Amino acid sequence: ALRYGGYSVDSYASAIWDDADMVAIPVRVGSPDVAFLDVDAGEAFQEAVSSYNHPLDHPDTPEYIINSHFLAADMYNKAQNDTIALLSYQQAISLYADSKNKEINERVFWARYQIGSIYARQENNEQALKIFKELVDHKDGQGQLWKKLARENYRSISRKLAYDEYLKE
C-alpha cells in the first residue's frame, strides 16, 4: 500500500475519492508517496507545470516568463556576479533573438549591450569593443538609448586602446 505521513493511502482512498474536492498526486516522480490536494490547488499545480513546460519561444508565452529571463540576468549584473550574468544574458538572447515582438527585440539588444558592459568592466576590451561595434552597426535601433550608449562605449574603449598603444611606443 502507498503511504503518506505514516498513513496508508488505502485507508484514505474511500474518503478521498468520495470527496470530489480532493485529488492524490505523486510527491516525487517515481515515488510511491502521494500528497492529497484539493482540486483548486491541484489545478494551480497543473497550471504551474504547464507554464513551466510551455515552449519559451511560442507566440503566446506569458510576458512574465519572457521578462523573468532578462530580469534574472539584470539582477546578477547588478550584483556584479559577472559569470552568471553573462550566461543568463546569453541564454535569454538565444531564446528570444528571433522574436517578432518589438519589445522583446529591445530586451535582446539591451542584453547584448549589458554583455558588452560586463566585458568592459572586466577590462576585456576586445570582446566589449566587438559587441559594441555589432550594436552600433546593426540596422535596427536608430535613436534608441542602447545604440547611443553602445556608440559612446565603443568610442571610449577605442580611444583608451589607442592611448595605451601610444604609451607603448
Image (tube, helix red, strand yellow):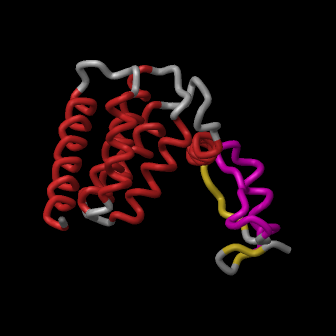
Residue 75 at what x, y percent from top left?
30, 55
Q: What is the number of callouts on the image? A: 0
Residue 29 at what x, y percent from top left?
74, 65
Query: Dividing the image into 4 quarters, which one contains the C terminus?
Result: bottom left
Residue 72 at what x, y percent from top left?
38, 52
In the image, is residue 20 part of the stretch drawn in magenta?
A: yes
In the image, is residue 102 part of the stretch drawn in magenta?
A: no
Seen in the image, is 152 located left or right of residue 112?
left
What is the magenta range?
Answer: 8-30
Q: What residue lies at 58% left-to-right and 24% top-to-bottom?
A: 59
Q: Is residue 52 above or below residue 12?
A: above
User: Residue 102 versus residue 53: which sits nearer the camera?
Assistant: 102
Seen in the image, is 5 located left or right of residue 17?
left
User: Residue 65 versus residue 110: which sits nearer the camera?
Assistant: 110
The quarter of the picture where residue 51 lies is top right
Residue 144 at what x, y percent from top left?
25, 24
Q: Residue furthest right?
A: 1
Q: What residue lies at 44% left-to-right and 46% top-to-bottom?
A: 69
Q: Residue furthest bottom?
A: 6
Q: What residue lies at 59% left-to-right and 46% top-to-bottom?
A: 52
Query: Dividing the image into 4 quarters, which one contains the N terminus?
Result: bottom right
User: Residue 13 versus residue 96: which sits nearer the camera?
Assistant: 96
Q: What residue lies at 23% left-to-right and 47% top-to-bottom?
A: 158
